[in-house]
Amino acid sequence: MLTPMPEARLRKDRRLYLWVAGLFALLAALVGIGVLSAAAFRQAVGDESERLRAGALYERSNETLLAASALYDSLQDAERGQRGYALTQNPVFLDPYNANVSRVGPRLDRLEALVDVNEELRPKMDSLRTITGLKLDEMEEVVAKIDSGRIEEARQDISSGYGRRLMQQISDLLVDIRVTEEERLAERRAAALGSADESERTIERLALFGIALLASGLAAVVALGLLLIRAYRSALREQLIEDENEALERAVAARTRELTVANERLIAEAQSRENAENRLRQAQRLEAVGQLTGGIAHDFNNMLSVVIGNLDLLKRRTELEAKLLRLVDNALEGADRAATLTSRLLAFSRQQSLKPQVTDLNLLLRNMEDFLGRTLGETVRVEFDLADNVPSVFVDAAELENVILNLGANARDAMPKGGRLLVATSCDEIEVEEERHGQLLYPGRYAIISISDTGEGMPPEVLEKVYEPFFTTKPVGKGTGLGLSQVQGFVIQSGGTVDIESAVGEGTTIRILLPEGEQREDVVGMLDGKVDGPLPEARPGETVLVVEDQDQLRSLTTDVLRDLGYEVEAADSAEDAQRILDEGGRFTLIFTDMVMPEKSGDELARYARSLDTRQKILYTSGFTQAAGVELSTLEPAAELLRKPYAVDELAHAVRTAIDS
């Protein structure tokens, strides 16, 4: 017993049979339309070829008739010119004669070319050429007789009728040619019309057949359309089910991604918070160390000023033996080295006294080129790559030179076998306020100094500690560990930032970013450095008020100025100095320390200027940030003598401040 097929299977098989039948019907209609189109195309091509051929023959016949008429017209016009010349002997008639005689030959050739395909006209064409030649000879002979003066003889030739008979023969031959061509023209016209009628009948038959095929194809298309609609509805239902499944899968995947992103964000925030806390702890630790070193350096500067000043006075006031003089010089050299270390400590703590000025970086580096090459030695090849668009910066040029020399020396130590040191400049533009390398940079143009070496490089664990105070990779006794922390302190104090890139075996690059600077005329100037020559002495009546909270330094300064001839009065604080001023004391110069308890030196200076606007001021300090004072914004502006100072530096500073 046969098992009946399922209903769904039967419906599917019926749809399959209908699809096959519809496709066969459509295929048959398309094949028929293709055959019909090919036949119509062949018929159209054949008809077009026939029409073109008939048109060409028709045109040829018309040209033949026109050529025959043109030939006869030329002969007639030439004959008229000949006869006019014979009657009047006026050369004017020779112009049309000669012009038409010259046209006869080409027109005869043209006519012969047109009738050459017609065997029936070839004998008549040969006769026409012969008689035309005789006519041309006859006209030429008459013209020649007239030219030679035989006029009567020429007239007799014309009157003989020989020329007219030749023209009549030519006319008869041309009439025969025209008649023949007109007959052929009528035949060709009839043939073309018959071909057109046959083409129309063929096209009508093809059109009827095409309509039938189109109807069959349309029926097949309608059937297939119905099948397509049913198939589309079925596919649509299946697609809806698939879309719902995919939407569910996408929703699950999206939720999974959201959870993953949220988890990654939480991990990143935790890591960022941990990094920020580490940076804050590091900054607080460095700030604490900086405050400590700054305070120590301030007190140390005062003590060094006392030591250096007293040693200097000892040399100047006594005649020492060579051995004792050498001991004093050694003590002075040790004090100077201690002063250098103090300056480094202040640079690290960002509390050193700077002398900022507008500085052309490219010019500064060019001036250092030879000196830097000699300092680093022959094993290091120093190269410069200076950009043209680098802005000037407002920095202490001498300190910046020290920074570059220190970085060059570090690079040399990292290349024990020699190598290449590249010093480059460039420019960067910061659009909005942003943080770079732990420092907040404001919008504007920044100059960049890059110092790159081909040395050994540093691993990441060393790179993390390079700014820490007293950290060094050099052997014991070869470094203080303040080099890079001093560089960072100076750059940050100048409003910039510093960045280091390094990898083991690939060398190190240090980039210093400094903001574009503008010249300011009211900033505190710096008076320091050894000055050769005799000490300048006081002029009669010049008085100095010395304000210093450190007893020994105040006593030393007072003694030195009195030795130079100044009338000196001392105060141990700004309040004591104000009391002296209030009691009527007037001084040529007030020489005041910047950092003192309760009131700072600039506050005292402002009070003194309120009493006398012409009062001259000279500041002294080893650092100013501890008093909350920025040198670039001091009011009133005046010169500043940096501690520790020697006797000659003090003498020249006081003299310069009074004379300014």
Image: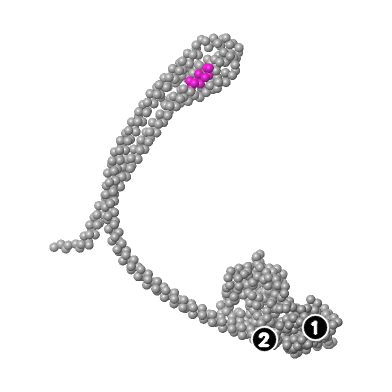
Foreground label between 2 and 1: 1
**Residue 325 in sight from this viewpoint:** no
Specify the segment rendered in magenta: 71-80
Q: Tell me if residue 397 is in the magenta stretch.
A: no
Looking at the image, residue 618 lies above or below residue 369: below
Q: Position of residue 177 (x, y in %)?
A: 42, 21
Which residue in the structure is indicated by mark 1? 587
Which residue in the structure is indicated by mark 2? 295
Residue at 56% in and 77% down: 460
Task: Determine whether, in the image, residue 562 is placed left or right of residue 120.
Answer: right
Q: Position of residue 46 (x, y in %)?
A: 35, 36
Numbered-mark total: 2
Q: Secondary structure at mark 1?
A: loop
Question: Which amino acid is tagged 2?
Answer: Gly
Query: What is the C-alpha distance between the residues marked 2 and 1?
Result: 31 Å
| Magenta stretch, main secondary structure class | helix
Task: Determine whether, in the image, residue 430 is placed left or right of residue 172.
Answer: right
